[in-house]
Structures are given as structure tokens and as C-alpha cells.
Image: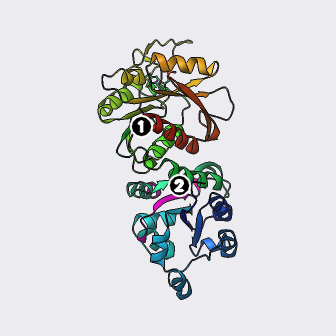
Amino acid sequence: MLLLGKNVLLGVSGGIAAYKTPDLVRKLVAKGASVRVVLTSSAEHFVSPLSLQAVSGNTVSNDLLDPAAEAAMGHIELAKWADYLVIAPATANLLAKMANGIADDLLTTLYLASVAKTVVAPAMNQQMWQAASVKRNIALLSGDGVEFIGPAAGEQACGDVGPGRMVEPQDIADYIDNITEVEQTLSGKTVLITAGPTREAIDPVRYISNHSSGKMGYALASAAKAAGANVVLVSGPVSLSPPAGVERVNVDSAQSMHDAVMAKVNDADIFIACAAVADYRAIDQAENKIKKTSDELTLTFTKNPDILKDVAALPKAPFTLGFAAESQKVEHYARGKLEKKKLNMIAANDISIQGLGFNSDQNALHVFWPEGDKVLSADSKTNLAHTLISLMASHYNNK
Ligand code: C5P
């Protein structure tokens, strides 16, 4: 009940996912929040104000120029009332208006008038989500400190498959709850995080890589940011937008990830190695495309530097949190790595469990440190990231 006594202003814009917002209100209320809802005029085509009024217990506002609503609680008063402004679903059109300071209705005016932490759950067709203008607007809003949750990928109402679905109400409610929990525990600290896969070139057109999606590392970056840290994310090639207010350094090979980390690590208080770094690279990278002249092809590989081990071995090493993907004897191997790499903490995931971990939105972790351990049971990567950051911060702060 971390949202007990907190005021959540929920802004709903006109996407099909708006039909899920009464459920979102119920979930926020169940966590103890007071919720008031503002609808755009197009949102009313997808969800009834009366339903939202019934579940929130408050009148629903939709018009900037409504004398009755202004008399009850004026729009500036409403903007000041909110501890959190949650916009779900946020359409491409609404994002464009928010990014450009347009305030031509009640919701966009409230966004401009409010200093509340703003969390946005976008929802749109997958092609619209990938449009250059939408990406620009997301980057602008991220720079302004807006936090994004989702969108999730999957089948869409229009029949398309891809990223653009609104994150489920339970995950949005948990996310807001978690922001409250981890609030400012890493204030003033710099957290350096590696995420995603690496690509090891074998010739100018081919590479060897792995299935890491980067989701866990990006969720950790977002959670560390929400906990007040200054976050630098060294990322291998992934199809994710950088979280709000996070500095992203793009890399491809293990060596380039190593170089980028070493260039930033002196400023870091905490280093989190979440990337799935390739252990080996081809000894010789062919100068030209390898031709299919023979029936067999042999490549020789050499070991890549271990970024995490090198960081932990630095004379002024930051607090280090590593990851271990294991398919058997999870505790044995994870504790082995904790000791061998001289880490402060290690988060192990059992990759033999179907539907969790690699390339999934869900994960489960078993975290070890020299004197103890904690199981973080299966949950969305977003929620797990908040729990792990808060566990790590309490160890770091008691160090
Ligand atoms: O030894 P193993 O590869 O299983 O260790 C995994 C941990 O080490 C992860 O935290 C991963 O990000 C990190 N790592 C690294 N550089 C490598 C290999 C792994 O930072 N070359």
C-alpha cells in the first residue's frame, strides 16, 4: 500500500486500450491511491466517463471550459493536487502535443501546469510506434523527464503484430507503486549499466550474436533513474528506446562495450553488468565477404575481455552487480562467479525455465551476496528491476 495517501491523476486519450482504464483505476485504488480521471474528447468514444466515475469515486473531467468542473476543482488546482500524472493510453497525437507544448484541451493543459512525476503508457499501431516523428517526440519527452512504460509487443486490435500494445493495468499500477518504493535511494549516485547482446563480426556482412533483447538492462536503467541515480547505459544493438533521462552509449562488439565501460567507469558508484557479452570473437575478421566455395567452413575464435571482472578488479572499483544465466546448479555456479569475479552481488536466472528470461517480458531471479541471498519470484522485468534496484541500493547504502 505504498500509494496510500498519494494522488494519481489519470489522463486517458483516444485509443482502443482506453477500455482497460476502469480496471487500471481499480488497481490504483486497491493500492491506496486517490484517483481522478481526465478524458480527452476522443477517449469518450472508447470508455464511458460514468464507469470511470463509479470506480474512482470522483467526477471525471473532460473539458477545459466547463464552468461546473472549474467551480468544483479548477484545472490549476487539479494539476497541483496530483502526486503522479499517469497517461494511459497515450496516443501518437497526444505525445506530439505534449512534446511540443500544445495545450488545447484539459489533459494537455494539466500536463503543462503540473510538476507531478509523469508516467506515460503509449498505445498505438506498431507501424505508428515506429514512425520517425513518434520516436522524436518520445526522445523529447524523455529529455523532459517523462517516464515511459511500454508499449508491450504482441497482437494488436487492428490485427497487426508488433510493439504498440498498452502495458497491462496491473503492470502500470505496480510500476507507479514501485516508483514510490525506490524513491531517491540512489540520489546523487552514478550507475553504469551494460545491456543487450554484442555482435562479433566474422566478415563485413556477418556476425555472431545471441538472443538477448536488452529488456532487463533497460528496465534496470529505468528503475535506477526512478531511484534518483544518474544513469549511463552502455547498450549493444537492441530495438528499445532509451529510458527517460538516461544517457545511452551505443556499442556493438564485446571489445567496444569494454572500451565504452572503461571510459565511463571512473565516474560510476555502481556498475551493473546485465549485457549478454559474447565470450569469444573471430581471431581474424575477413576483409571481404566469405565466399561459399568449400563445403565446410572453420572459424577460429579467441576469448573476449571479461568486462565485469575487469571492472571489479579496478583499484577504485565501484559496487558491482553481475548476472549469471544458468541452466543447472544455479546457486553453485552463481556463488562461484560471485567469488571468482570478486563481485558485491550477483543475480542468477535459471534459463531452463520456459517463458522466463531471454527475450521474454518476464523473469525470476535468485540474488546472492557474500553473506546471504534472496529469491525474487517470477514477475514482469519492470517490477523485478525495481525490486532488484531497491535490494541493491540497501546493500550499497549499508556498505
Ligand atoms: O562468466 P559469465 O559470462 O557467465 O558471467 C556473466 C556476467 O559477466 C554477466 O554479468 C555479464 O554481463 C558479465 N560479462 C562481462 N563480460 C564478458 C562476459 C560476461 O561483463 N566478456
Specify whether residue 339 is painted magenta.
no
- Crowding around mark 1 (Cα neighbors within 10 Å: few <14, some 14 to 19, many 20+) is few
Q: Which mark is residue 397?
A: 1
Q: Position of residue 103 (x, y in %)?
A: 43, 74
Amino acid type of disc 2? Trp
Residue under the image location 49 percent in, 21 percent down = 338
Residue 359 location in percent, x, y?
59, 36
* Residue pictured at 63% horizontal, 22% vertical: 327
Q: Is residue 149 left or right of residue 57?
A: left
- What residue is at 48 percent from the left and 23 percent from the top? 278
Q: Residue pushed farthest bottom? A: 67
Q: Is residue 387 left or right of residue 313?
A: right
Read off the residue under disc 2: 129
Q: Decide which of 367, 254 is in the foreground and name it.
A: 367
Local crowd at mark 2 within 10 Å, few (<14), some, or many (≥20)? many
Q: Residue at x 59, y 73 (%)?
A: 42
Q: Where is residue 371 drawn, in percent x and y?
A: 52, 24
